[in-house]
């Protein structure tokens, strides 16, 4: 069945105009004024609404064995949550540990999504070890349609790579045209600072940030930049939380390193005082790199507005308070790191970015959709509204007013870090390849229609 969306205010990263959009066989078949739908097809009146390209979250964790537990969502809950918030494509970190075989890991992660996800998906392939067998396996994974790797310069002995492994990964990526996404923190400094704080009896969640101060992150970025410069590989710094880390990447960019910067919605909206709340409430806000002092927020918004920061992701890594975050009572180093936010990213970015005058609508679409599509080999199939693109569309009601609450969210966690936060505007209709999956913030569609997106290496 075709779908006609009439009279919407279409906004892409570059354009803004009023028109109708006809979706046929999963694609955008026509854009214009006064389009007619074949009889019997669904017509949606989008007068007074924006129509955005489906949003892309380029950094999520869904299946994640981590810190002695497993992230709480599966593809059913995570993709429904993503869609309810207007995100139609997920790029998950496929994260086998150093002990696991990468090919088996890839198959395992794929099996968690296939036939279950309600939105489209692909993976960044983590390289947690690089031995004599790794190169051949990574080449096979790239042949399967993976165009980006992931390295961790943190989490020693679990996901973290040695410098020699980092070099080999970047050298192979350069040869293949693969972009390498990287978690940048100096893991030795983290381990030393954690031990010092614990020895001083500083065990609560408020000590997580001091155990990974901004210098730890900036050193990680600087380290990656040296390796990217030496190998010529294209790199993408994930979840950048603070001014010194952005500056380390910017400085490298100015001397010719091909680097792009991601921040995530918690760093734009929350600050370090949240992890300082009493009675272990702060554990809800423990993630790495940590949520920083308030002054970094303004810097990140400015870096986003000036496009020094390319993308706003979530780093969705959902853990319950009960039974999971609680594992770190009495020892903050054992609190599972991560926040759930895949459902709320777009609404928060719109409310606290666009509506507060920090970014314009084009930057909003660019950072939450288009740039991820371009960087990760999905453009123009995803990330824009154009003839022949996938009909992933968000009809957005700017007049909606509501609040975020765990009582009504689609994510599987028992809390929402944004509990009670007001939201201005939300998706009133979300389509995946022309199929209506969400109406008025509620998932009304079909599980399992999500497709694995095969990508070409473009770097
Ligand atoms: O705290 C975080 N960020 N948890 C998820 C794993 C990662 O480092 O991205
Ligand atoms: Zn990370
Ligand atoms: Zn992550």
Image (cartoon, rainbow, N blue to C red):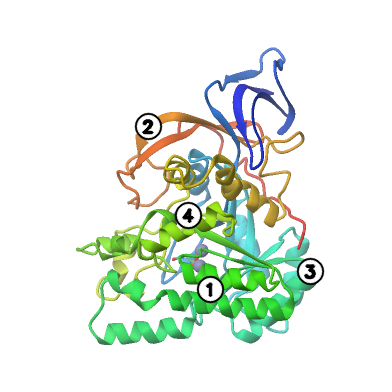
Q: Circle 3 is placed at which residue position?
A: 176
Q: For the residue with label 1, is its CB less than 8 Å from the closest atom of ligand 2?
A: no
First along the sequence among labels 2 and 4: 4
Q: Secondary structure at mark 4?
A: helix
First along the sequence among labels 2 and 3: 3
Other-residue count near label 3 (Cα within 10 Å), few / some / many at <14 / 14–19 / ≥20: some
> Position of 85 compared to 389: left or right?
left
Residue 200, position as x, y percentages in the image = 24, 86
Q: Circle 4 is placed at which residue position?
A: 301
Residue 184 is marked as 1
Q: Secondary structure at mark 2?
A: strand
Quadrant for the N terminus in the image: top right
Residue 293, position as x, y percentages in the image = 35, 65
Q: Secondary structure at mark 3?
A: helix
Q: Are marks 3 and 1 in contact (CB under 8 Å)?
A: no
Q: Secondary structure at mark 1?
A: loop
């Amino acid at each position: 069945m075709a779908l006609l969306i009439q009279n919407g205010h279409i906004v892409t990263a570059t354009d803004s105009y009023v028109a109708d959009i006809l979706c046929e066989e999963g694609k955008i078949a026509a854009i214009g004024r006064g389009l007619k739908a074949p009889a019997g097809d669904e017509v949606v009146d989008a007068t007074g609404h924006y129509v955005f390209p489906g949003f892309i979250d380029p950094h999520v964790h869904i299946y994640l064995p981590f810190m002695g537990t497993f992230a709480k969502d599966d593809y059913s809950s995570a993709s429904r949550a993503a869609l309810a918030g207007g995100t139609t494509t997920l790029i998950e970190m496929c994260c086998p540990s150093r002990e696991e075989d990468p090919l088996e890991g890839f198959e395992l992660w794929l099996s968690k999504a296939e036939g279950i996800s309600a939105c489209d998906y692909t993976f960044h392939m983590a390289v947690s070890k690089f031995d004599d067998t790794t190169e051949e396996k990574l080449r096979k994974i790239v042949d399967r349609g993976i165009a980006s790797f992931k390295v961790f310069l943190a989490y020693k002995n679990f996901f973290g790579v040695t410098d020699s492994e980092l070099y080999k990964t970047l050298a192979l990526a350069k040869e293949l045209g693969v972009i390498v996404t990287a978690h940048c923190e100096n893991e030795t400094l983290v381990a030393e600072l954690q031990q010092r704080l614990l020895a001083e009896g500083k065990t609560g969640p408020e000590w997580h940030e001091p155990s990974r101060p901004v210098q730890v992150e900036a050193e990680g970025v600087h380290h990656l930049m040296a390796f990217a410069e030496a190998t010529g590989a294209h790199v993408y710094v994930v979840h950048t939380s603070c001014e010194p880390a952005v500056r380390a990447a910017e400085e490298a960019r100015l001397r010719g390193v091909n680097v792009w910067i991601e921040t995530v919605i918690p760093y734009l909206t929350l600050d370090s005082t949240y992890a300082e709340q009493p009675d272990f409430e702060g554990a809800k806000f423990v993630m790495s790199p940590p949520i920083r002092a308030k002054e970094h927020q303004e810097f990140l918004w400015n870096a986003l507005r000036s496009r020094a920061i390319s993308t706003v992701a979530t780093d969705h890594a959902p853990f319950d308070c009960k039974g999971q975050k609680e594992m770190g009572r009495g020892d903050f180093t054992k609190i599972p790191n991560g926040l759930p936010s895949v459902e709320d990213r777009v609404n928060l970015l719109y409310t606290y970015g666009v509506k507060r005058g920090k970014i314009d609508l084009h930057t909003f679409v660019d950072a939450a959709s288009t740039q991820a599509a371009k960087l990760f080999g999905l453009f123009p199939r995803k990330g824009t509204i154009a003839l022949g693109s996938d009909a992933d569309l968000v009809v957005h009601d700017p007049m909606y007013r509501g609040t975020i609450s765990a009582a009504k969210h689609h994510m599987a966690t028992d809390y929402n870090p944004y509990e009670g936060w007001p939201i201005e505007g939300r998706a009133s209709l979300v389509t995946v390849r022309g199929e209506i999956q969400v109406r008025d913030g509620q998932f009304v569609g079909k599980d399992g229609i999500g497709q694995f997106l095969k990508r070409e290496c473009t770097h």
